[in-house]
Image (cartoon, rainbow, N blue to C red):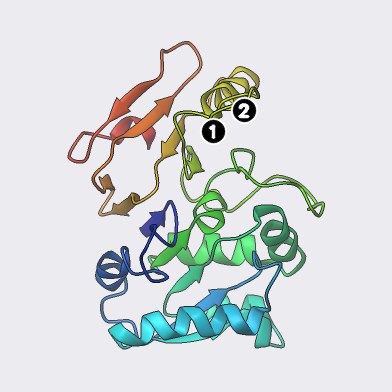
Amino acid sequence: MKLLLISNSTNTGEEYLRYPLQEIARTLAGVREVAFVPYAAVTFSYAEYERRVQTRLAEIGIRVRSVHRASNPARMIREAEAICVGGGNTFALAKKMQEQGLMQAIRSRIRAGVPYVGWSAGSNVCCPTISTTNDMPIVEPASFRAIGAVKFQINPHYLDANPAGHAGETREQRILEFIEANPRRWVAGLREGCMLRYENDRLELIGSRPMRIFKKGQAPFETNPGDDLSFLL
């Protein structure tokens, strides 16, 4: 498998997809065209999402074709050189992907070695389920099951604390609830500006910030770029 799973698309003060572009280029080396899944978009159109991604990937010589334009989106995935799945609302993304059979199609292509790049919701759907998303369930997918390309869960945009004056649960408390209910699953709290690369059976953290790891029966701990992450595989 060849995966690039990105926490967030945009760092503060930067252009869209600017900070991960070099790693995207590395993952998609030799690729001329990607099949793009825009279904996490809610407040703007799929066409606009395609345009945004095309504007950035054009800089590395890649054409973007959105599956929403295809008469058979699953077939487009099965024939794609590479696959990109964008961020937004994870529930909206999962619902549409399930309806069109894209979860299974993408899983098969990933296992065949086709490169996959996802950010935010697009990273979350690469996990066994979408249960560690931060999003509101604005629509109801058939289930929480996702692509399952990796065995662990990702919590994108991981934050260490709540905003000042907010007395609700912290992100860590919510993840601790998840692992209590799902004791066999590891959860990776992927902070903004960071990404995970899986290639040649090796998982690597990329970025300037550590990743927080959760597992039932263990105290949460931090891993840094360069650390051995094979326990997640």
Residue at image point 47% right, 37% down: 152
Left or right of 174 on screen, residue 13: left
Q: State the separation of the CA atoms marked 2 and 1.
A: 6 Å
Whether pointer 2 and pointer 1 mark residues with C-beta atoms closer than 8 Å, the reply is yes
Amino acid at pointer 2: His
- Residue nearer the viewer, 101 or 90: 90
Neighbourhood count class around disc 2 (C-alpha, 10 Å): few under 14, some 14–19, many 20 upward: few
Q: Is residue 82 above or below residue 166?
A: below
- Pick the quarter of the image with the C terminus: top left
Q: Is residue 1 visible?
A: no
Which residue was labeled with disc 2? 166
Q: Give the image location of residue 124, x and y in percent.
A: 54, 49
Amino acid at pointer 1: Pro
Residue at image point 69% right, 57% down: 94
Q: Give the image location of residue 51, x and y in percent.
A: 53, 85
Residue at image point 65% right, 24% down: 168
Which residue was labeled with disc 1? 163
Helix, strand or loop for disc 2: loop
- Residue nearer the viewer, 15 or 201: 15
- Pick the quarter of the image with the N terminus: bottom left
Q: Residue furthest left?
A: 226
- In the picture, the disc for residue 120 is none
Q: Give the image location of residue 196, x and y in percent.
A: 34, 49
Residue at image point 26% right, 48% down: 207
Helix, strand or loop for disc 1: loop
Q: Is residue 142 visible?
A: yes
- Residue nearer the viewer, 115 or 19: 19
